[in-house]
Image (cartoon, helix red, strand yellow):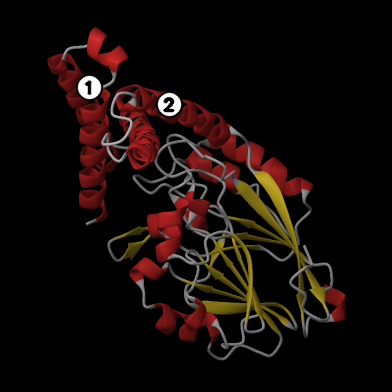
Amino acid sequence: MFGVILIFAVTLMQGYVFWRAASVPFVRRRISRKGLAGLGFVLWVLFMLGRVSAHEDSGSLAAMLELLGMTWMAVLFLMSVSLLAVEAATGFGIFLARFAPTLRGAALVVGGALSAVALIQGLRPPVVQSYDVYLDGLPGELDGTVIVALSDLHLGPVLGEGWLAARIAQVREERPDIVVLLGDVFEGHGAPGKELLAVLRRLSAPMGIWAVLGNHEFHGNRSNTAWFEAAGIHVLRDTWVELRPGLVLAGVDDLTNNNAADSLAKALAGRPTGVTVLLSHAPLPEDVVAGKGVNLLLSGHTHGGQVWPFGYLVEQRFPLLEGRYEFEGMTAIVSRGMGTWGPPMRLWRPAEILRVTLHGGTRTPHGM
C-alpha cells in the first residue's frame, strides 16, 4: 500500500510540475510540449525502474537506479512546494496573471536550489546532539552514565563500510557506557555483506550494544535478527534486561508490525524496580506510554521529516517528531536519524547522533 501511494504521489507531482513548466516563457521558447512530455516520461520511468529494481535486486546498478529515482522524487517535491507557494500568491493565475508564468519559472529555480542545498546537507556527517536527563531513582553510582543512541542508519549499497567506519569513530569519541541502535539499521532490500557486519562489530561499550528492530528489519512478519547477531548486537524484542542494579533497558518491536500497547506490556512485565529506559523505533503515542513507569523513551523513525517541509505531514502521524519532550513524569527523545531514506537529502533537518547523559535527582525540562 505504501508503494502504491508513493507512486501515485510522484505521478501527481510530476504531472503538475511539467504542466506548470510548460507555461514558463523561458521553457516554452526552448522546449516543445512534446519534448517536455517526453522528458517527463523518461524521468517517471527512471523513478519506476528504481522502485522495481530496489526490491528485486541488491546490486550496484539497482542501487544507482533507486538513488537517482528517489532523488528525483525529492526534487519534484521541492519544486511542487515552491510552485504551490506561487499559486497561493497568484490565486492559480487569477491575480497577477501577466506575471504568473514568470513567477512559476522562479519557483522552479527555487525548488532546484533547495534541492541542491538538501543534497549538500544530506551528505554531511551527523552532528552529535547532547542531552542531560535527570531521573528520579537513578542509583548514585550510575550518575553520569552516557548512552549513545544511533537510529535510521539505512546501511546498504549507498551507505556502506566507509561511511559506517567514520560514524563508529564519532561514537568512540563520545566514550559511551551503553550504545543503543533504534532500528532501521539496515536498508533491508538484501542481506548486508560480511564486510559491513565486520565494521559494525567495532562498536563497543562497557554495558553492551543493544538494539530494537525497525520497519526495514521486517519483511512481512519475518524479522532479520540474524543480521544483528552476526554483528554481536543484542536485540530486545518486547523484553527487558537489567544492565546494572537500578537500571533497566527495555525494547519493543517496530509498531508497524505490532500492537503498541501489547508490545509495551510484554516489554515491561516483571521488570525489577529502578529506572527504566525504553527503546522503540517509532515514537510510542503519549497515551500508550505515559504512566507505565518508563523514565526515558528513545526513538527514531521520523527522520525529523528529513526534507522540509515534509515534516509537517509526518507530524500528523507522529506528534513526537524530533527532539525532547516531557510529559507525565517521563522524558522522550526522538532522533532525526543518522542516514537517509530514499534520496540522500536533508533540508534544515541535519542527521544526528544522540548523546544522552543520565543524572540522578529532580527532573527538569531545561537540563540540556
- Look at 38% across and 32% down and name the residue there: 75
| Depth order, front residue of 115/19 | 19
| Depth order, front residue of 271/32 | 32
The CA span between labels 2 and 1 is 16 Å
Q: Residue tagged by mark 1?
A: 22
Q: Position of residue 125 (x, y in %)?
A: 63, 37
Mark 1: secondary structure: loop
- Look at 28% across and 29% down and name the residue there: 97
Q: Quadrant of residue 211?
A: bottom right
Q: Residue tagged by mark 2?
A: 112
> In the figure, is residue 230 to the left or right of 367?
left
Amino acid type of the residue tagged 2 in the rendering: Gly
Residue 317 in sight in this render: yes
> In the figure, is residue 168 to the left or right of 299?
right
Residue 267 in sight in this render: no
Q: Residue furthest top?
A: 30
- Look at 54% across and 85% down and name the residue there: 268
> In the figure, is residue 184 to the left or right of 330?
left
> In the figure, is residue 229 to the left or right of 95?
right
